[in-house]
Image (tube, helix red, strand yellow):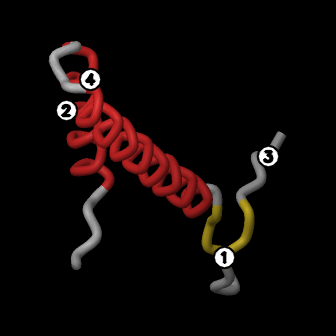
Amino acid sequence: MEEKTFETNLKDLESLVKELESGNVPLEDAIKKYTEAMELAKSCSDKLNSATEKVNKILASDGELKDFKEEE
């Protein structure tokens, strides 16, 4: 199974939140949707953290990835 993109997960999460906020979801469905929403939120958070780590590294002149340090 192909992993969903961050954007797809975020869109699905937004859709679930709208459904839950409507108040028109039976309790059992609401619990399932809430659980799914929390899983999507964690996936989005994990992807953002991973992207942040990658962005905070720069390629040094010797070809190694090193942590980015802001020069003062």
- Is 63 placed left or right of 5 in the picture? right
Q: What mark, if any, has residue 20 been given in the picture? A: 4
Q: Nearer the viewer, mark 1 or mark 4?
A: 4
- Is 12 placed left or right of 57 in the picture? left
The residue identified by callout 2 is 15
Query: Hey, what amino acid is under mark 2?
Result: Ser
Q: Nearer the viewer, mark 2 or mark 1?
A: 2
Pointer 4: residues within 10 angstroms few (<14), some, or many (20+)? some
Q: Nearer the viewer, mark 4 or mark 3?
A: 4
Secondary structure beneath label 3 = loop
Q: How far apart in space, not on screen, are marks 1 and 4 (Cα)?
A: 43 Å
Pointer 1: residues within 10 angstroms few (<14), some, or many (20+)? few
Query: Hey, what amino acid is under mark 4?
Result: Leu
Q: How far apart in space, not on screen, are marks 2 and 4 (Cα)?
A: 9 Å
Toward which corner of the image does residue 53 lie, by quadrant?
Answer: bottom right
Query: Hey, what amino acid is under mark 1?
Result: Leu
Residue 10, x across and y down, in percent: 29, 42
Q: How far apart in space, not on screen, are marks 2 and 1 (Cα)?
A: 38 Å
> In terms of sequence position, does the residue under pointer 1 or pointer 4 come before the other?
4
> In terms of sequence position, does the residue under pointer 1 or pointer 3 come before the other?
1
Secondary structure beneath label 1 = strand
The residue identified by callout 1 is 65
Secondary structure beneath label 2 = helix
Q: Nearer the viewer, mark 2 or mark 3?
A: 2
